[in-house]
Amino acid sequence: MTVLSDKWITKMVKSQGMIKPFVSKQSRKGKISFGLSSYGYDARVSKEFKIFTNVNSGVVDPKLFKKESFVTKIGKECIIPPNSFALARTVEYFKIPDNVLVICLGKSTYARCGIIVNVTPLEPGWEGYVTLEFSNTTPLPAKIYANEGVAQFVFIKGNEKPEVTYAKRKGKYMKQKGVTLPKV
């Protein structure tokens, strides 16, 4: 297995449209950085957020998740209540090659504030906007900024193509467009 470089990522964007829109270098300009890095790509969060609320006092059940458990907010920022979480999606649309696995790690700027970004690996053959989960581990409200960097995606080339890709098995989160809630 090999971690893939900025040169490989750029080549795949140009030849296969692997990331759209693509920012070819780290962009800061008073924002949390995003764009191409040495061995990864720092993605941005869109302006649509789904903030978890316990107003309906239900049980959190991944097999029977109620969309009423979220409040939708669209804007330049999102305030996550203490000890709660929010869902969002990347600005970028990803198309993962059949021989690559992508691992997502939260940006240190957020981690140092007690805000954890969680994403499961992007499997070979998967494509779509990535649904992001932000956990506020602090006892205070926490702020997320739309259209700024939130997580680094690291591309790892496998030793061979898998027998069955995410696309071939028709994975339930294939080609997701917006913030996607749990499915069974």
Image: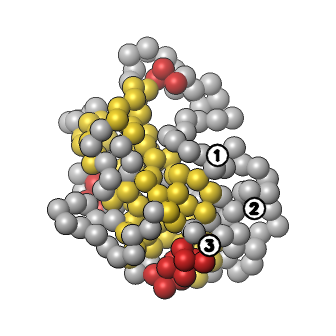
Q: Which residue is mark 2?
A: 165
**What type is the residue that disc 3 sits on?**
Gln
Q: Are marks 1 and 2 in contact (CB under 8 Å)?
A: no
Give 30 or 161, whichever is nearer the viewer: 30
**x%, y% of residue 51?**
38, 32
Give 146 or 83, whichever is nearer the viewer: 146
Left or right: 165 as drawn, with respect to 155: right
Total marks shown come to: 3
**x%, y% of residue 7?**
49, 85
Q: Is residue 26 above or below residue 52?
A: below
Estimate the spatial distance between the alpha carbons at disc 3 and disc 1, rounded to whole Å: 21 Å
> What scheme was used to colour the molecule?
secondary structure
Estimate the spatial distance between the alpha carbons at disc 1 and disc 2, rounded to whole Å: 13 Å
Element assignment for label 3? helix
**What type is the residue that disc 2 sits on?**
Thr
Q: Within the image, what quadrant is residue 183 found in?
A: top right
Q: Which of pointers 3 and 1 lies earlier in the amino acid sequence?
A: 3
Furthest-right residue in view?
163
Q: Are marks 2 and 3 in contact (CB under 8 Å)?
A: no
Give 182 or 146, whichever is nearer the viewer: 146
Residue drawn 69% across the image and 43% down it: 172
Crowding at label 1, few (<14), some or many (≥20) Cα neighbours within 10 Å? some
Q: Which mark is residue 173?
A: 1
**x%, y% of residue 156?**
58, 74
Q: Is residue 181 above or below residue 111?
A: above
**Which tag is nearer the camera, tag 3 or tag 1?**
3
Q: Is residue 167 above or below residue 157?
A: above
Left or right: 162 as drawn, with respect to 18: right
Left or right: 86 as drawn, with respect to 173: left
Q: Which residue is mark 3?
A: 16
Residue drawn 46% across the image and 47% down it: 89
**Which tag is nearer the camera, tag 2 or tag 3?**
3
